[in-house]
Image (spheres, rainbow, N blue to C red):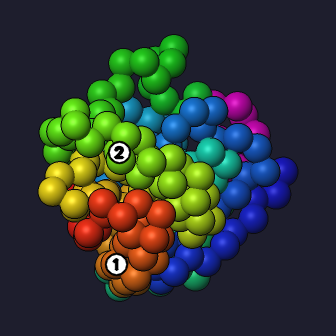
Amino acid sequence: MFIETELTPNPATIKFLPGEPVMTAGTRDFPDAESAAASPLASALFDLGDVSGVFFGRDFVSVTAGEGVDWSALKPQVVALLLDHFVTGAPLFAGPDASGINVPAEDQTIDDDPADAEVIEQIKELIEVRVRPAVANDGGDIVYRGFRDGVVFLTMQGACAGCPSSSATLKHGIESLLKHYVPEVLEVRAA
């Protein structure tokens, strides 16, 4: 088995591609060691001591190094852990499956107005079809959090969370796209 690596726009994060599915459905963000308790792999990565974030995508694992960490020393350790995990077929989550893991609902942050249902569906479809694949290419994900008074609230995850260019991505990329296709969108904000 060979694990490929890709740099991401976030210099603190590297995307690792094991050449097989990581998550069969959805994504999972581990922003700290406490949240990683749900996954033996995420826990092992945090146990390296220099890891400050782990993100599981469909076919990749993004790992964020702590501030000032030298990737030349950390990268071989991460690759070794990932090789061991995927070669042995170890479970990604503790327990028989991931059903017991509490993941916040996508629309938990903002209560959407039912009168905006059609607009919200257009926004969600554009995010799913046009935005999420591009963000996944950079080692992260984007989650819809709500729409209120012309403002779309989104959360960046994985390599995109804390990336120096994430605010530019939200404002100039995603906001422009949504405004172009959905005239009711006036602004995009991080939630």
Q: In this orientation, does residue 159 appear?
A: no
Residue at image location 41% in from the left, 60% down from the top? 182
Drawn side of residue 155 relative to residue 115, left or right: right
Q: At x 53% / y 61%, what residue is drawn?
A: 131
Q: Residue 7 carries which label?
A: none
Say if the magenta span includes residue 10: no
Label 2 vs 1, first from the N-terminus: 2
Determine the residue positioned at 70% across, 41% down: 21
Q: In this view, does 86 lie to the left or right of 23?
A: right
Residue type marked 2: Ile
Whether residue 123 is visible: yes
Residue occupying the far right of the picture:
1
First to last magenta residue range? 82-90
For residue 149, what is the image quadrant? bottom left
Amino acid type at image mark 1: Lys
Q: Mark 1 points at which residue?
A: 171
Q: Residue at (42%, 41%) from the top-left corner?
A: 121
| 65 lies above or below 24 | below
Which label number is shown at residue 120?
Answer: 2
Q: In which quarter of the image is residue 174?
A: bottom left
Crowdedness near tag 2: few (<14), some (14–19) or many (≥20) residues, C-alpha within 10 Å: many
Q: Nearer the viewer, residue 121 or 76?
A: 121
Up/down of 105 relative to 12, above or below: above
Whether 89 is among the magenta residues is yes
Q: Is the magenta stretch mostly helix, strand or loop?
A: helix
Mark 2–mark 1 Cα distance, whole angstroms, equals: 19 Å
Q: In this view, does 44 lie to the left or right of 15?
A: left
